[in-house]
Structure formats: structure tokens, C-alpha cells
Image (spheres, rainbow, N blue to C red):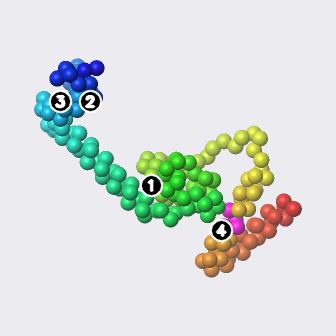
Amino acid sequence: MLCEICKVNEAMIYVKKYIEGEITSIGMCFECAKNEKKVNFANNITLEELINGLVSMTKESINEMKKEEDKYKDVQCKVCGMKYLDVLKSGKVGCMECYNFMKPQLLKRINRKLTNTKYYGDIPKNYDLDFDEHFLLRKYKIKLKDALEKENYYDAAKYRDLIKDLEYKNG
């Protein structure tokens, strides 16, 4: 579609206005949109001011993301070794423990107001309980190591006993 103002360039920006139930729309090329003074929005903001505001917001957003990447570059899962920056790039976590190790960063990234951020998914019918116990054992070993590093011997003893029970159960 051609620009409705200059009738030469391809229209790239489309503006729709809803005024008293009537819809008016106009398609403009970038040059005409930049120079157009007739298109005003709420509070008399021109189209040029709107575009400039969006561009500056995008630049601020990119700068914020770079700061966040620098701040959390060393955060990684202790189970699978997946780094937080890799999670950002791929959009996928390496294992289910990644959620625990990266919880504050992931919750901040979600940027949604949820009443409950815990996942309560379905368990498949053919779910292998041995698989679950395997990860539970790994989780307890990590918590045992952390408790020992913090010299929290009460929790360390609790995790030691849980590990022994799981290992005894699995033979």
C-alpha cells in the first residue's frame, strides 16, 4: 500500500483513530510520518514525538537488559551447569533445578503480576518414580553440600539421613 500523503513510498506506519465511534485510518511512509503534524494523539502528542519516545524507550530497555546481563553473568545451575545468560538466549532451562537456582532472576524477567508463580502441572500416566527419586537424591546432595558450607549441621544431618534413606530404598 502506498503512503496516503506522498503517494510515492510504501506505507509502513498505520494510524487508527477512534473518535465518537467513528474509525479513521491513515497509512504513511517513515518520511511523511516524521513530518506529519496533523496526526495528534491524546495530550496533543504528535506522531514524531510518539515515535521518538518509543525509540528512546527501546534504547533504555536495551541498556537495562545489558546491565542485568552483566549483573547476573555468573549465576548458574549447580546441577546441570546452565548459565542464566544461556537461559535468556535460548528461552529454555537445562533442568528442573534451574528454576530453584535462578528463581529471583527468572521471576523478575517474567514481568507479570501473577498471584501464584509455582507450577502445579500434571503428572503423566507413565511417569517413572525412579526418575523422580534420582533427581530428589541429587537435590538432597546439593542441599547437604550447601548446609555444610554454611556450617548448618542440623540441616546437614537431616539431608544426610534423607540421602541414606533414599539410597537404602533403591538398594
Residue located beneath label 3 in the image? 32
The quarter of the displayed image where residue 6 is located = top left
59 over 18 or under it: above or below: below
Instruction: Give the main secondary structure, helix, strand or loop, of the magenta stretch.
Output: helix
- Determine whether label 3 and label 2 are within 8 Å by CB: no
Viewer-proximal residue among 68 and 107:
68
Crowding at dot 3, Cα within 10 Å, few <14 / some 14-19 / many 20+, comes out as some
Q: Estimate the x, y position of residue 8 in percent, counting from the top left.
A: 20, 22
Mark 2 is on which residue type?
Answer: Ile
Q: Judging from the image, what secondary structure is the residue with disc 4 in?
A: helix
> Which mark is in front, 2 or 4?
2
Q: Judging from the image, what secondary structure is the residue with disc 2 in?
A: strand
Q: How far apart are the alpha carbons under marks 3 and 1?
A: 39 Å
Q: How far apart are the alpha carbons under marks 1 and 4?
A: 24 Å
Mark 3 is on which residue type?
Answer: Cys
> Which mark is in front, 3 or 2?
3
Residue at point 49% right, 56% down?
A: 85
Q: How far apart are the alpha carbons under marks 1 and 2?
A: 32 Å
